[in-house]
Structure formats: C-alpha cells, structure tokens
Image (spheres, rainbow, N blue to C red):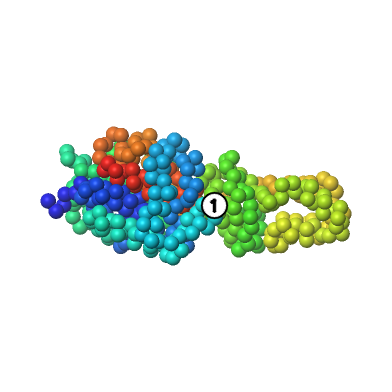
Amino acid sequence: MADNYDVVVIGGGAAGLMCAIEAGRRGRRVLVLEHADKVGKKILISGGGRCNFTNLGAVPDLYISENPQFAISALSRYTSADFIGLVEQHGIAYHEKTLGQLFCNGSSTQILDMLLQECSDANVEIRTSCTMTGVKREDAGFRVSTSSDSVSAESLVVATGGLSIPKMGATGLAYSLARQFGMAMTEVKPGLVPFTFRPPTLDLFNNLSGVSLGTAVTCDGVTWQESMLFTHRGLSGPAILQVSSYWRRGSEVTIDLLPHVEDAQAHFDDERARRPGTELATVVGRLMPKRVAQAMCGTLATRPLRTLSNTELANFAQSLKCWVVTPDGTEGYRTAEVTVGGVSTDGLSSRTMETKNVPGLYFIGEAVDVTGPLGGYNFQWAWASGYCAGQIA
C-alpha cells in the first residue's frame, strides 16, 4: 500500500506546496511530485531573491481572465492577510516596498523554508527529480506513472504552472493533462514581459539603453503609472511589463513621458514666457533624463523657446504626453514572468478548483486562466487557489 495516496500534487511550486499543506492538515496522505531537483525554484528567484510574496491590494478586479468573476471566490477565501499571518507566525520579517508589494527583509529562502516546514508538520511527502510519464483514470481515482514507479491517488492536483521561464523547468504539462481529460484551453501567451522593436524605432532605444524614467503606459485601455526602462532590444521596466499582459501583436502602446505634468503645453508656454532664450532640450531635461530629453526633442533640441511657434510647442507637448509606439513583439517565455491564459475556468469550480467533468481532478496556480499584475499578485493567486483545492482534495 506504500504507493497509495489520498492526494498526489504534480508540481512543487507555490500553488502545489500550499495545496499539499492544506490537504495534509486535514489528515490526508499527500505526495508532491516535482521534476526538478528541488521544489520552489521560482519562489527562490522572485523579487530579486527577496520574494515579493503577496500584495496588499490583491483584489479580483486586477486579474486577467476570460471569466473575470472566477477569481473572486478563491481570493476572498484566502487573502493576502491570511498569508501575511502565516509569514508572521514563522517570524519572518518583511516590508512594503511600493504599491502594496511585500518582500522579505532577508532572503526568499525564508518563504520556501516556511512552506517546507509546514509540509513537514502536515506529513506531506515530497519527491524531487521525479518526472511524471503518464496519468490514467481508475475507478478509485488516478494512477500516476513516474520516472521511478507509479502511485495511485484518490485526488490529483495539477500545479505545474505555465510556460514562462523555461530555464527554470517550465513545461506545458498542465495543458497536456487538461486536454487529456477533455478540458478546454484559452489562448496562452507570455505576460509581464519586455517589448521588442525593429529599426528605426529600435535604433532610438539602443541609444537610450539603460535609462529609466517614470511613465504612464497604456495598452488596450489599461494604464499603469510606473517606471519604464530602455533596453538594447526595446522597452522594459514595471510599466511595460504590466501592460504587456494585455498587448496583442500589432497593437499600439501609448506612453506618457510626463505623467507628473498635467498640462505639458501650459508648462512649456510658461517656460517660454519666463526664459525665452533657453533651448528646448534644456527645458525638457529638467523633467526627464537628459538623454531621453535630447532624443525626444530631435531637430528641435537646440532651438530657443522663443523661436518655436504655438503650434510647434503644442505638437511637441502632445508628443511627450501621448507617444505612440507599436512593438514588433515580446521577448517571449524566456523572460516572461507569467503565462497569460491556460486551462479554461469554464470547466473548474471557482470554490474548489476541481474540474466539473472529472471528479477528483484539480488545476491550480499559473496553469489556470487567471493572471495577476506584477508585484506579488500571482503569488497570492497561487496561495489562494492552492488553499481552496487543499480544503477538499
């Protein structure tokens, strides 16, 4: 009977470990199967090694899904406050960085160690370097074949994530299993990912590579006001990563380079009245990094303000407040922090994450068509969806 378990969780990431903990606390015999040599690899690299483990503002409205209502139940049943309580219970010091983002004061290993301690306390068994080779439905549940043996389980939880960061071991296993059991899929694409461009736009970005500035970036009607970074391949930084999850090939992205200046035209008119002999690039350089100011001014850079007509100044102000670019693409799953889309929520219970057509089968975390913004939101979805599945699996 050594190979018989109540619950087998495929995937030892944030969602899988949380689900295993909750199921184990209920007295269930739980096995976690992880194909990598250690669990929680994404946890360890997150937040620059300090793990942005949740966000104080993790409300359902900020998540992307074909069914925007789906995440309400899980995120309401297990909130950021609940996870913070667990962190505090383990004596882990943390701080709020910006916009509700919570990070460990120390290392990401503290969060992983906390989860592993909770797994141990709940008698959860974890096997690493264990590749799943097949799953079959049985009368009493499921038979899971692995690279070393096979195990049976009454409940099977798929927590293998999406396609983002393949160097960390990401695969499309969750999607294959979903299709095997007749689950519908939504379109998947890289999310929270830098944009790439082609010349001549790329030439401009190459010259500004490494420079960042505060912006408000809009795509598909969604605006994020955060910093933007010029790179040798295009655009990155928090504002760009945020809107990338909404971007579709061929779509435009609108960038406000002066989000802190409400009326740019009035500002430049006032500067012209007070300092008519000042060159335009000098004035703009007081509002943004000088290299960016020089590039955006172009041929007008050395023109004294008094030589610019009202129309020229108005058009220039508009170009800074509403700079429209069209990315050629993104850097793809190689650098994407998440996968947008996944297993359709139409086939899942929003309360338990159990599939509607296959009793005992669950999909949680990034594998599901629920994607949060940058800043701890996707960890909170992992904790919440894992918690909900763990209450019944």
Q: Is residue 352 above or below residue 1?
A: above
**Regarding mark 1 in the picture, which secondary structure is present there?**
loop
**Which residue bears the numbered disc 1?**
99
Asked whether the viewer can see residue 184, the reply is: no
Q: Looking at the picture, which amino acid does disc 1 mark?
A: Leu
Residue 48's x, y, as percent?
A: 47, 62
Residue 312's x, y, as percent?
A: 81, 48
Q: Residue at x 66, y 58 (%)?
A: 204
Q: Residue at x 59, y 60 (%)?
A: 231
Quadrant of the snapshot with the C terminus: top left
Which is more toward the observer, 141 or 55?
55
Q: Residue at x 33, y 57 (%)?
A: 115
Q: From the viewer's perspective, is 360 left or right of 250? A: left
Asked whether the viewer can see residue 244, the reply is: yes
Q: Residue at x 35, y 54 (%)?
A: 13
Residue 185's x, y, as percent?
A: 38, 39
Which is more toward the observer, 36 or 286?
286
Residue 353's x, y, as percent?
A: 33, 40
Q: Is residue 224 above or below residue 290?
A: above
Numbered-mark total: 1
> How dense is the environment of label 1, judged by Cα within 10 Å: few (below 14), some, or many (20 and up)?
few
Which is more toward the observer, 266 or 133?
266
Q: Residue furthest bottom?
A: 106
Q: From the viewer's perspective, is 351 left or right of 338? A: left
